[in-house]
Image (cartoon, rainbow, N blue to C red):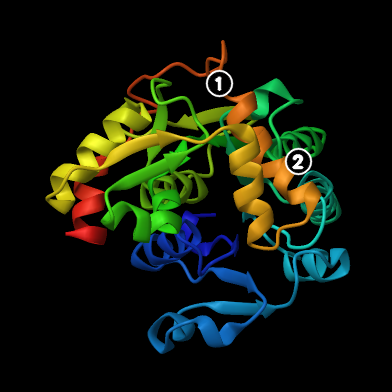
Amino acid sequence: MTSLNRKIVVTTPTGQVGSRVVRLLLQAGVRPTLLLRDAGKLDPETRAGVEVAEGDQTNADFVVEATRGADALFWVSPPGTGEDPVEAYARLGANAALAVRENGIAHTVFQSSIGAEKRHGVGEIDGLARTEELLNDTAGAVTLLRCGYFFSNLLADTESLRAGVLRTPWPLDHAMPWVDPRDIGEVAAARLLSADWQGKQVRAVHGPEDLTFARVAEILGGVLGHEVKPEQLSDDEFRSMLTSVGLPAAQVDGIAGMSIGLTGDFVPENARSVFTTTPTTLASWAQGQFG
């Protein structure tokens, strides 16, 4: 069976990563099956080139039925609202693993995160770690994409950036991988289109370079044309900010726990190499967003 004849199922197909996966599969000549809550979010041209399974990933029966006959699955666990994100991610992971087992899906690509290798103590990433374990317990081949910090996380603070301030709970001198979500989509699509890999594999997606928030502020200042000052928030300040926008305590713990768990002596399990480095720089991404 060629990759063009395989049934490839994509979750969160309108997200930053999923939409790139869908576009590349279409361009490769594949007619993917998209799992999403609202097919109305698809543009007409894309809608004409795909199969649609409309439903909720939290519904195990829906996930199993929608993936019936699938040869490959791209699984992204969408963030939950109003509940413990670790438990929510673990439940979603259980649905994915059930579908892989019930339908004998040969290849699964899972969008995980750096820090999942710690298994515990990394906030909501602990839920992604549990999903990794659940998928690894299935008989199918699995690739875990351990992704760096998304460039697009900066969009949540656009107003402050334009005012010249970059606020973060991370230590300003802590360097870590930063990545364009579109580049993650390219890595995922390449994996989904290949049918000759086996076993359980980890593929980190680290972006072009490790960056500190101090360096990020410098890069953004160059794009915006004015100085951007990095400012580290204390844990209490960050939690207060999250609470002020209505997030429940469990979600606050999950978000705040990520920056705590990924600093200190944490080093990603996968070293930077030609296999983990993607091309899009923060400067080029920011130019498209803020330039």
- Left or right of residue 270: residue 279: left
Toward the top, the furthest residue is 265
Q: Provide residue 67's location: percent of width, then percent of height.
A: 73, 64
> Which sits earlier in the primary sequence, circle 2 or circle 1?
2
Q: Provide residue 113's location: percent of width, then percent of height.
A: 58, 36
Inspect this view and state whether residue 125 appears.
Answer: yes
Q: Which residue lies at the image location 86% right of the left edge and 54% below the top edge?
A: 102
Say which residue label 1 marks. 263
Which three-letter amino acid code belongs to the residue tagged 2? Gly
Q: Which mark is residue 127?
A: 2
Q: Provide residue 91's location: percent of width, then percent of height.
A: 84, 51
Q: Residue 130: which quarter of the image?
A: top right
- Front residue of 107/78: it is 78
Q: Which residue lies at the image location 19% right of the left edge and 48% below the top edge?
A: 284
From the image, which quarter does the C terminus lie in?
Answer: bottom left
From the image, which quarter does the N terminus lie in?
Answer: bottom right
Q: Provide residue 257's location: percent of width, then percent of height.
A: 68, 34
Inspect this view and state whether residue 280 appears.
Answer: no
C-alpha gap between disc 2 and disc 1: 18 Å
In the picture shown, does residue 3 fall above or below 47? above
Q: Which residue lies at the image location 17% right of the left edge and 52% below the top edge?
A: 224
In the picture shown, does residue 173 fall above or below 45? above
